[in-house]
Amino acid sequence: MSMFADIPVDVGVIYEGERIRWQDAYTELGGPRVEHKFELVKVRGMDEVEDGKITIIGPDIKDLEKKSYPFGIFIEVAGKDLEEDIEGVIERRIHEYVNYIEGVMHLNQRYDIWIRISKKSFEKGLDSFVYIGKVLQRLFKSELPIIEKIQITFITDPEKVKEKFKEAMEVYERRDARARGLKDEEVDAFYGCTLCQSFAPTHVCIITPQRYSNCGAISWFDGRAAARVDPKGPIFRVEKGEHLDPLRGEYEGVNQIVKMKSGGEIQRVWLYSAFGYPHTSCGCFEAVAFYIPEVDGFGIVHRGFTENTPIGLSFSTIADSTAGGRQIDGFHGISIEYMRSSKFLQADGGWERVTWVPSVVLERVKDFIPKDLVGKIATEKDARTVEELKQFLVARGHPIVKRWEAKAAEEAAKSMAVAEEAKQASPTAAIPSAIVTPAPAADLTVPVGVGAGSFRFILKNAKIRAKRVRIIRVKEK
Ligand code: SF4
């Protein structure tokens, strides 16, 4: 039986996390196959909103087929205590409340939404957006009493979606720009969010002015507004506590709250690093920064990128290895806005460590990349394999190449030291040009010299990589 008598399907938290596979879907709204999709909330004056109104522009659910449609959800709210600040937070709740509806799956946020309606729920009678609108209106008003009036418009007409999509993108940009310029050190508290725990139970977002939420939908200002209007809700204030590591971004208060909210699973968080104790990754991050060992740098791939990255994996495969509320060394869920922050992967080298980014993303963040790096970071137009990437980085003089040279020099110096030691130990022979890299390999015995004065050089559990080996006979005096 339904929670609401006039809604043909059930509604409740138990349906959150429900996945609808394509073969079980009646139709799909938004998603990776369509360019224009969005959800947007605007705060209006009390006399600008007609409470309970639901408008559908374009075909309704019953008139749709099994394919992907451009789609928009536009929600207008009013209330005497409502301020613009809260728009982003109300908007993020759409994800949660739509997922409460049996047989409706909502993924992602803002310009990236992806909704499926199951065949089963359609057959039960869920054949109009009016039902979805009614559920949203009731849940919003009961969960956030600050909302006094709410009207919702669903758009499936492709031209109208496209038109409103542009407006939505401008609103998102204005919201994001607001937090820019504010520094983590300047605020007295951060904010946390556990909205994604229904999909990733140990995930806790820590939202700071310079580390935007993973989904890219909640800024520090949004977090502050949400914690004020609904202090017991999923978005809460985080006392910073002692600043334990300014480079990596480790705060005592963050560690404490993450430990508590993750049920003890996550003990420490480094806010500005993808290694060691990185911020956890839920599943609705906008992009993933992934470490490429061959270039000792990062690639970044966003949700909308449908081709393979230079490591031969697609976004969805990389996302699967990253998501779930875990801390995976070198695989890091991030938002686009975080890429615009001066603290972006600060502990790992920041933008100087980034080697490959899809061109669409690069275009969106290029004004925030150090000027001398522009043109040196590869996109899918420059490199499709790791080999092509290496060649591009060398040709363009990416700073990572200096890192390789420094590393090689360091290794060579180490080898020379080993060789020098060997020379000291041997009055009759030397192997000065070998580059020795200890690695788990077989033991190796190298006979050196001949006759009575000869000896054997035994390298235990080692592998030798050598560009050139010179064996020099030392003449008897
Ligand atoms: S990604 Fe983070 S901030 Fe965004 S909804 Fe999920 S937990 Fe909240």
Image: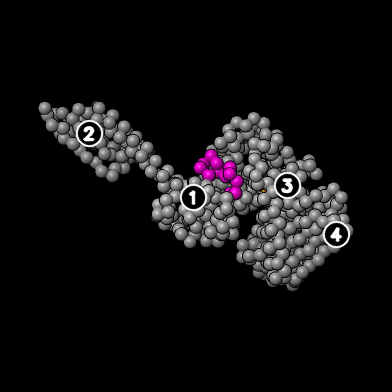
Given the image, on which type of amino acid does mark 2 rest?
Ala
Residue at the image position 67 percent from the left and 37 percent from the top: 186
Label 3 SS: helix
- Binning the other alpha carbons within 10 Å of mark 2 as few (below 14), some (14 to 19) or many (20 upward) gives many
Sequence order check, earlier mark of 2 and 3: 3
Judging by the rendered image, the residue that carries numbered circle 3 is 222
Given the image, on which type of amino acid does mark 4 rest?
Val
Residue at the image position 53 percent from the left and 52 percent from the top: 300
Along the viewing direction, whichever of 168 and 333 lies nearer the viewer: 168
Q: Answer whether labels 3 and 1 touch (C-beta < 8 Å).
A: no
Q: For residue 203, say whether it is visible.
A: no
Residue 56 placed where, x, y %?
A: 78, 67
Given the image, on which type of amino acid does mark 3 rest?
Asp
Judging by the rendered image, the residue that carries numbered circle 2 is 430
| Cα–Cα gap, marks 4 and 2 | 87 Å
- Binning the other alpha carbons within 10 Å of mark 3 as few (below 14), some (14 to 19) or many (20 upward) gives many
Judging by the rendered image, the residue that carries numbered circle 4 is 49
Q: Which residues are magenta?
A: 339-350
Along the viewing direction, whichever of 289 and 20 lies nearer the viewer: 289
| Cα–Cα gap, marks 4 and 3 | 22 Å
Sequence order check, earlier mark of 1 and 4: 4
Residue 80 placed where, x, y %?
A: 87, 50
Sequence order check, earlier mark of 1 and 2: 1
| Cα–Cα gap, marks 1 and 4 | 49 Å
| Cα–Cα gap, marks 2 and 3 | 67 Å
Given the image, on which type of amino acid does mark 1 rest?
Asp
Sequence order check, earlier mark of 4 and 2: 4
Location of the N terminus by quadrant is: bottom right
